C-alpha cells in the first residue's frame, strides 16, 4: 500500500457496529429491528441483516485450509473439479452402453447405471461396460440391494480382467438398505449384515465406495436443510459404527461410505450446508481414531431436488436447478447430478438431458467454477451460515444418537414423523402463499395448459413389494396440490372466467386486480383485467357480456362500503361475487350476503378448491 493510500484510509475511520445499528434505528423510524430486518430461518436460527469481521473472528472455519482436516474448505487443495454425472436406466445392456458412449463424448465424465436386480450377471456387465474405460471415467451402479454383493464381485472380476490399476478406479455402488426402511418402511435388517462383505470386496480399491447414505430422499420429501444434514450424518455414522463393530478397520470403513445429498433452492445456505457437512463428518470420523486424516473426508454426490419442480411453467425448473447446481459446485462436492427439467411429468428425453448436462458444462467451461477452491471462504455471511447450520444439525445428530442411533430412530418412526411434519407444514405454507412457488401459486402463466402432461408416478422397480413394517415418508412435490387443482379445472366443460370489476381509487384497484388475477389463475381460470369502470352497473354488465363466472370487485378499503353491496345486488347471483381485500366493513358486507373475500391472509389452495366446488368442478 502506497503512502497516499495509507493517508486516504487513515482519514476515513470505519464505522463501528453500534454506529451501524444507531443509523438503522433512525432509518426504521421506530419499527422493531428484530421483526423488520432479522430473518428467522426455517432451520431454527436467526440471520442478521449484516455481518462484520468481528462476527467471524470467534469462528474456527475461516482459519481452515483447503484439503486439510476438518475439510470444511473441501477435500482438494488446488482446484474445485467435480464429476459431471448422468444417470442411465440400464434395463437393456446394449442400449445403456450405446447411450453411455454417446454422452461421454458430450461432456459427461461420471456414469450412473441403474440395473434391474434380475439382470445382474457377468455377461450383462461385459456388454454394459464395453468400450468404457473405467480407469478414466467414474462409474457408479445402483441395483436391488439383495443383488449388490453379487454385482460387486462381478465388477471386481471385470476390473481385474481388464488389468485396471486399482488406484485409478473411481466410482460407487449405491447400497443403502436403510433408505428402504426410512422411505418405504421395509424390514430389511438382514441385509445390513452384507455391509462388511461389500467393503471386503472393494478393500483394494481406495476410490471405489460401496456404502451409501441417501439423504437426497429426505430432501425430495421436503426436509429442511438442517434436517437433511443432521440425519445424513447420523445415517452415515450408523453404517460406520456397524462396520467397525463387525471388525472392519475404521480407515477402510470410512473410505467406503458415500453421501448422496439433495440441493434445495436456498442458494447461500446450500453452499454453507456442504461446507458444514464436511466439517461435522470429519469430526465424527475422528472420534473413531483413524490412522489417516484423509479417512475423515466426506464424499458427496449432490442431486438437484425434485421437491420444488413443477409440471406447469416447467422451464422455470431450469432456473431452479441452475442455482442449485451453482450452490453444490461452489460448496465443493465430489459430483453433481442435474435433474432434467421435465422429470415431474415424463421420462427425460435427449433434449432435457442435454440441457441438464450443459448446465454443469457452462459452470465449468465458461464460469470456471472448477478452478477456485472454496470461493465462499472468508465471506462473513457464508462463514456464519456454515457455523449456524452445523450447530443446528448437530442438535439433530445428538438427538438421534441419544435414541440409540439412526437405525433405532427409524424403527421408532421419529425420523419419518419429523420429515412428514415438515412436508405437511411446507404444503400448508404453500397453500397460504407464505412459501412461494414461481409459476404455480405466484405469477402463474395465465394462458398455459397442461397439453396432456400428467404427474409422473415413480415406483421401486426392484420387484419386491413387502408390507411396510415401519412408518413411511410421504413424498409429494410442493406444487402437486395446485397442479391437481389446475388439471381438474382443465377437464371441466368450460374454463371458468374471472372478471376484474375495477373501480374507484386507481392505485388500489390496479394492485388488487393484479393480485386477484395471480390468485385465481393458479386454478387455471381465465382472468380478465380492466382499466376501470365509471359505475358498478357498467362493470357488472361488461362482466356478464364477457361470460364471467366470477366477478371480482377491485377497489380501496374505504370505497368498498360504497361499491360492494350495490354491485352484489345488481349482479343478483348471475355469477359468483368476490371482494378483493379484507376491508373494515367486512362484517357489514357479510351481513348483506357477500361470502367470498380474497386477500393475502386467506388459504389460497382451500379457497380455490371451494370455488371449484361452487362451479361444479371436481
Image (cartoon, rainbow, N blue to C red):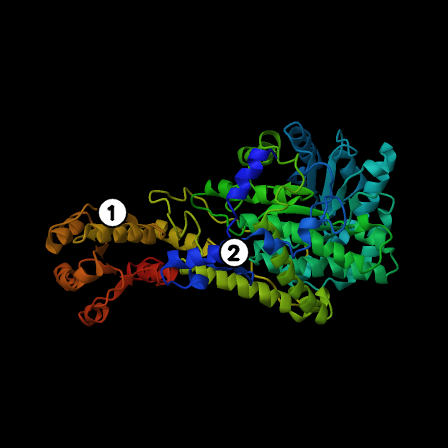
Q: Which of 609 and 263 is in front in this view?
A: 263
- Is residue 442 left or right of 52 when viewed as pictured? left
Q: Which residue has dot 1 on it?
A: 528
Can see residue 224? yes
Q: Which residue has dot 2 on it?
A: 17
In percent of width and height, residue 155 lies at 81, 41
Count every numbered label the image shows and give the total.
2
Judge the density around disc 1: few (<14), some (14-19), many (≥20) Cα neighbours within 10 Å: some
In percent of width and height, residue 338 lies at 59, 41
On residue 393, the disc is none
Q: Which residue is pictured at 16% across the width and 64% down the height?
A: 561
In percent of width and height, residue 172 lies at 75, 45
Q: Which numbered disc, 1 or 2, marks the residue that appears first in the sequence?
A: 2
Q: What element carries label 2?
A: helix
- Is residue 143 left or right of 216 when viewed as pictured? right
Q: Which of 587 and 540 is in front in this view?
A: 587
Question: Foreground mark, 1 or 2?
Answer: 2
Q: Quadrant of residue 325?
A: top right
Q: In which quadrant of the rendered image does the C terminus lie? A: bottom left
Q: Is mark 1 on a helix, strand or loop?
A: strand
In percent of width and height, residue 385 lies at 59, 54
Amino acid at each position: 500500500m502506497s503512502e497516499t493510500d495509507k493517508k486516504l484510509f487513515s482519514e476515513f475511520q470505519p464505522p463501528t457496529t453500534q454506529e451501524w445499528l444507531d443509523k438503522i434505528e433512525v432509518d426504521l423510524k421506530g419499527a422493531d429491528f428484530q421483526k423488520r430486518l432479522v430473518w428467522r430461518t426455517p432451520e431454527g436460527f436467526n440471520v442478521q441483516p449484516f455481518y462484520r469481521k468481528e462476527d467471524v473472528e470467534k469462528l474456527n472455519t475461516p482459519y481452515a485450509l483447503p484439503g486439510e482436516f476438518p475439510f470444511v474448505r473441501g477435500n482438494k487443495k488446488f482446484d474445485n473439479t467435480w464429476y459431471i454425472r448422468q444417470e442411465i436406466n440400464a434395463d437393456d445392456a446394449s442400449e445403456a452402453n450405446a447411450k453411455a458412449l454417446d454422452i461421454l463424448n458430450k461432456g459427461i465424465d461420471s456414469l450412473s447405471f441403474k440395473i434391474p436386480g434380475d439382470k445382474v450377471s457377468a455377461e450383462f456387465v461385459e456388454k454394459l461396460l464395453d468400450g468404457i474405460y473405467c480407469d478414466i471415467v467414474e462409474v457408479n451402479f445402483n441395483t436391488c440391494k439383495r443383488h449388490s454383493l453379487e454385482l460387486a464381485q462381478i465388477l471386481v472380476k471385470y476390473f481385474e480382467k481388464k488389468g485396471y490399476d486399482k488406484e485409478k478406479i473411481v466410482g460407487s455402488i449405491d447400497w443403502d438398505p436403510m433408505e428402504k426402511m426410512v422411505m418405504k418402511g421395509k424390514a430389511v435388517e438382514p441385509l445390513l449384515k452384507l455391509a462388511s462383505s461389500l467393503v471386503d470386496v472393494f478393500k483394494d480399491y481406495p476410490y471405489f465406495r460401496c456404502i451409501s447414505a441417501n439423504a437426497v430422499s429426505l430432501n425430495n420429501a421436503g426436509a429442511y436443510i438442517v434436517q437433511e444434514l443432521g440425519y445424513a450424518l447420523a445415517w452415515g455414522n450408523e453404517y460406520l459404527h456397524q462396520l467397525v463393530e463387525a471388525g472392519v478397520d475404521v480407515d477402510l470403513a470410512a473410505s467406503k461410505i458415500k453421501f448422496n445429498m439433495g440441493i434445495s433452492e436456498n442458494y447461500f445456505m446450500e453452499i454453507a450446508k456442504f461446507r458444514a457437512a464436511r466439517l461435522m463428518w470429519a469430526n465424527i470420523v475422528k472420534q473413531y481414531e483413524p490412522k489417516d486424516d484423509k479417512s475423515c473426508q466426506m464424499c458427496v454426490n449432490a442431486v438437484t431436488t425434485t421437491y420444488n419442480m413443477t409440471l406447469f411453467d416447467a422451464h422455470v425448473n431450469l432456473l431452479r436447478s441452475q442455482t442449485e447446481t451453482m450452490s453444490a459446485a461452489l460448496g465443493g462436492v465430489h459430483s453433481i447430478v442435474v435433474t432434467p427439467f421435465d422429470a415431474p411429468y415424463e421420462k427425460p428425453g435427449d433434449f432435457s438431458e442435454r440441457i441438464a448436462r450443459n448446465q454443469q458444462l457452462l459452470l465449468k467451461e465458461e464460469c470456471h467454477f472448477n478452478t477456485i477452491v472454496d470461493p465462499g471462504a472468508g465471506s462473513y455471511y457464508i462463514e456464519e451460515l456454515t457455523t449456524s447450520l452445523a450447530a443446528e444439525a448437530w442438535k439433530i445428530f445428538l438427538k438421534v444418537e441419544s435414541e440409540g442411533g439412526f437405525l433405532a430412530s427409524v424403527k421408532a418412526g421419529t425420523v419419518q414423523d419429523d420429515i412428514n411434519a415438515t412436508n405437511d407444514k411446507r404444503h400448508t405454507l404453500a397453500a397460504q402463499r407464505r412459501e412461494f412457488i414461481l409459476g404455480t401459486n405466484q405469477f402463474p402463466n395465465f394462458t398455459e395448459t397442461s397439453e396432456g402432461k400428467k404427474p409422473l408416478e415413480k415406483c421401486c422397480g426392484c420387484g419386491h413389494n413387502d408390507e411396510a413394517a415401519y412408518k413411511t415418508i410421504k413424498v409429494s412435490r410442493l406444487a402437486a396440490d395446485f397442479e391437481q387443482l389446475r388439471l381438474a379445472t382443465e377437464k371441466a366443460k368450460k374454463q371458468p372466467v374471472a372478471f376484474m370489476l375495477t373501480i374507484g381509487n386507481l392505485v388500489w384497484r390496479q394492485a388488487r386486480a393484479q393480485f386477484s388475477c395471480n390468485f385465481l389463475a393458479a386454478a387455471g381460470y381465465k382472468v380478465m383485467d380492466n382499466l376501470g369502470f365509471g359505475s358498478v352497473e357498467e362493470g357488472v354488465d361488461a362482466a356478464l357480456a364477457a361470460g364471467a363466472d366470477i366477478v371480482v370487485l377491485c377497489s380501496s378499503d374505504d370505497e368498498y362500503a360504497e361499491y360492494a353491496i350495490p354491485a352484489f345486488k345488481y349482479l343478483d347471483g348471475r355469477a359468483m361475487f368476490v371482494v378483493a381485500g379484507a376491508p373494515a366493513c367486512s362484517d357489514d358486507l357479510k351481513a348483506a350476503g357477500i361470502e367470498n373475500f380474497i386477500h393475502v391472509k386467506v388459504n389460497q389452495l382451500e379457497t380455490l378448491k371451494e370455488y371449484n366446488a361452487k362451479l361444479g368442478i371436481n
